[in-house]
Amino acid sequence: MKTYLFSLMVFSALILGCNNSKQGAENAELEDSATLEQAGENTTFSELNINKQVADTIDGGMMLLGRISAEGLNQEPYSIWFEENSKTYTPDMALLEEIKPLIKPCYIKVFMGSWCEDSQREVPALLKLLKLTEFDRSQLEIIAMTHDKDTPENYEADYEIEFIPTIMFFKDGAELNRIVEYTQETLEQDVLKILKQQAYTPAYAE
């Protein structure tokens, strides 16, 4: 009888142990999901899996893919063109003062390619503009794409990304307008027109 009771206790402990282990894993998964959900579009994604590098089978070397940050662009080999094009961008400071209050409530989504010359020109300039206007970086999302203009996570779904970089400006959940591949005037002039909701037609618009 004692042997039977002891065996029953051991079996019960094992069952409870497995259930606790499973519950712990489920709780961890729920916590991870909650973190991602809470992060949403209002995060720099610094705590998430960003700045992923993969082999560039077309141009050779490596390329960024998926969600990235300015820190990702500041690492080699991307830092070579990032730093140079950031330095050469000299904005009109008077226009930046106009932009500063207008851009504050906006959310900006950028689709680019670390392999793309147009992206290499425009994105460093944009990030410099945002820094000078004290834009909240938690309101900025940068997504690096393949040569086919897509991502494994399908971040581009519903955004009709055909050319990059595509820089999209949102306010109150609605897209104001976008800059596609290159600016029509200067970056700060284009941005100001978009923020003021003046007539602005991006490249390749029908």
Image (cartoon, rainbow, N blue to C red):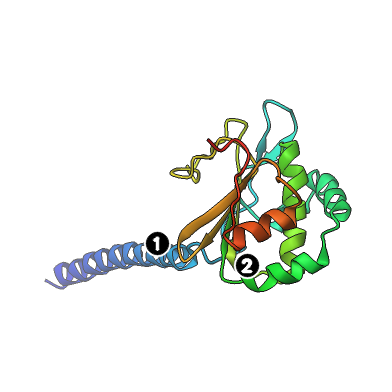
Placement of 55 over or under 91, stated as above or below: above
Query: On the rendered structure, is 169 left or right of 76?
Result: left
> Residue 105's x, y, as percent?
56, 71
Instruction: Identify which residue is drawn at 76% across, 51% down.
Output: 186
- The quadrant in which residue 196 appears is bottom right
> Residue 117's x, y, as percent?
75, 37
Q: Nearer the viewer, mark 2 or mark 1?
A: 2
- As drawn, the label of residue 71 is none
What residue would you read off at disc 1? 29
Instruction: Identify which residue is drawn at 52% across, 60% down.
Output: 170
Report helix, strand or loop for mark 2: helix
> Residue 176's x, y, as percent?
53, 57
Instruction: Identify which residue is drawn at 32% across, 62% down.
Output: 22
Q: Amino acid at mark 2?
A: Ile
The residue lying furthest to the top in this view is 58
Placement of 44 over or under 120, stated as above or below: below
What residue would you read off at disc 2? 103
How packed is label 1: few (under 14 Cα within 10 Å), some, or many (20 or more)? few
Residue 181 in sight: yes
> Residue 60's x, y, as percent?
74, 28
Residue nearest the viewer, comparing 169 with 198: 198
Placement of 123 over or under 103, stated as above or below: above
- The quadrant in which residue 5 appears is bottom left
- The quadrant in which residue 119 appears is top right
- Between marks 2 and 1, how big is the CA–CA gap? 36 Å
Q: Amino acid at mark 1?
A: Glu
Closer to the chain start, of discs 2 and 1, is: 1
Residue nearest the viewer, comparing 4 with 52: 52
